[in-house]
Image (cartoon, rainbow, N blue to C red):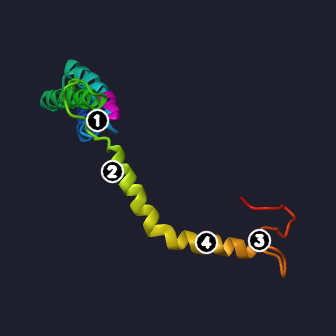
Amino acid sequence: MPAERSRLPLAALGFAAAAALSSWNPISAPFGLAVGLAAAVLAVRALRKGGARKVSAVALALSLAAAAASGLVLALTAGLGRGPGVAPIVVEPGREDVGADLGAAAERTRAARERARAELDALDRPEGGRTGERKDGGGERR
């Protein structure tokens, strides 16, 4: 049983370190919270059994700090603390800006679209036939 007592504080410290490393990112914060709480439970068990008390205490402190940081990151990500008077993170562009951007994009791609339309019309035109008749007999193109 002495070997188990010596491994438990190290396992708690390893899990606490993993929780601390994943507590800063909104995507990994849920894992940091879960692993931090599990590491805290392991650290408390290691403290009760005795053995490496300093390692267990460091693991407990680190795991609680990681769990708290993960909880804070999750709360801030969810919008806690952001009131209605605070400026939005992503500003919605105005109608004029969107219209100008779409017009500029249409102008940049006009030549390519006209060239593609001409190629499609050339494919639809049968040998010596009228424009608008399709090879498959589908009639006028819209």
Tell me whether circle 2 and circle 3 mark residues in contact (CB < 8 Å).
no
Q: Position of residue 89 (x, y in %)?
A: 25, 38
Q: Quadrant of residue 142?
A: bottom right
Span colored in magenta: 30-35
| Image-quadrant location for residue 70 | top left
The quarter in which the N terminus is drawn is top left
Looking at the rendered structure, which numbered label has been put on residue 116? 4
Q: Residue furthest top?
A: 48
Q: Which residue is mark 3?
A: 124
> Which residue sits furthest front?
130
The earlier-in-sequence mark between 3 and 1 is 1
Q: Provide residue 87's location: percent of width, then percent of height.
A: 21, 34
* Of 85 and 62, the residue lying toward us: 85
Q: Tag 3's secondary structure? A: helix
Q: Residue at x 82, y 68 (%)?
A: 133
Tell me which amino acid carries mark 4: Ala
Quick one: label 2, few (<14), some, or many (20+) residues within 10 Å?
few
The answer to whether mark 4 and mark 3 are in CB contact below 8 A is no
4 on left or right of 60: right
Q: Which mark is residue 97?
A: 2
